[in-house]
Image (spheres, helix red, strand yellow):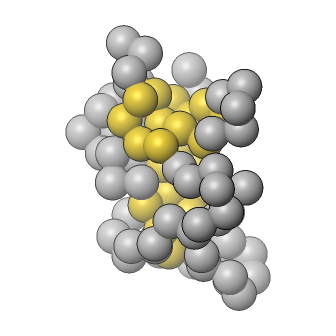
Amino acid sequence: MWSSATNPSPGAYAVMEPDGNFVVDRASGNALWSSRTSGNPGAYLSLSDTGQLEVISPSGSPLWPGSCDGTPVKPTNEGRQAHFNRP
């Protein structure tokens, strides 16, 4: 199972931004973690048949693969404002 390694963060939530960046934000809106995939408008979040969490480009190419072996992906703080984007 993928983990952003941002615990404990009460009120945190995950969003897919319009620019293609998948972000875990604090309740205040400041980023705790980012997939670093901004610059890819239209990208979307996908959970593959094998349990891999991915950010996929509009053309169908994976931009960011999460870890499905239990190893947490290191968080980054980018301080982004979050918005929902649904394909």
Q: Residue furthest front?
A: 69
Q: Is residue 57 above or below residue 12?
A: above
The quadrant where residue 9 appears: bottom right
Please report the residue visible at 61 percent of the width from the left and 31 percent of the height from the top.
Answer: 46
Query: Residue 18, can we see it?
Result: no
Please report the residue visible at 59 percent of the width from the left and 66 percent of the height from the top.
Answer: 71
Please report the residue visible at 64 percent of the width from the left and 56 percent of the height from the top.
Answer: 69
Residue 30 in the image, given as x and y percentages of width and height = 47, 74
**Which is nearer the eye, 36 or 72?**
72
Please report the residue visible at 30 percent of the width from the left and 32 percent of the height from the top.
Answer: 40
Residue 79 in the image, given as x and y percentages of width and height = 37, 72
Seen in the image, is 74 located left or right of residue 10?
left
Q: Is residue 27 above or below residue 24?
A: below
Query: Residue 27, can we see it?
Result: yes
The quadrant where residue 42 appears: top left
**Which is nearer the eye, 52 or 31?**
52
Q: Residue furthest top?
A: 59
Image quarter in which the N terminus is found? bottom right
Q: Is residue 78 above or below residue 35?
A: below
Q: Is residue 61 above or below residue 14?
A: above
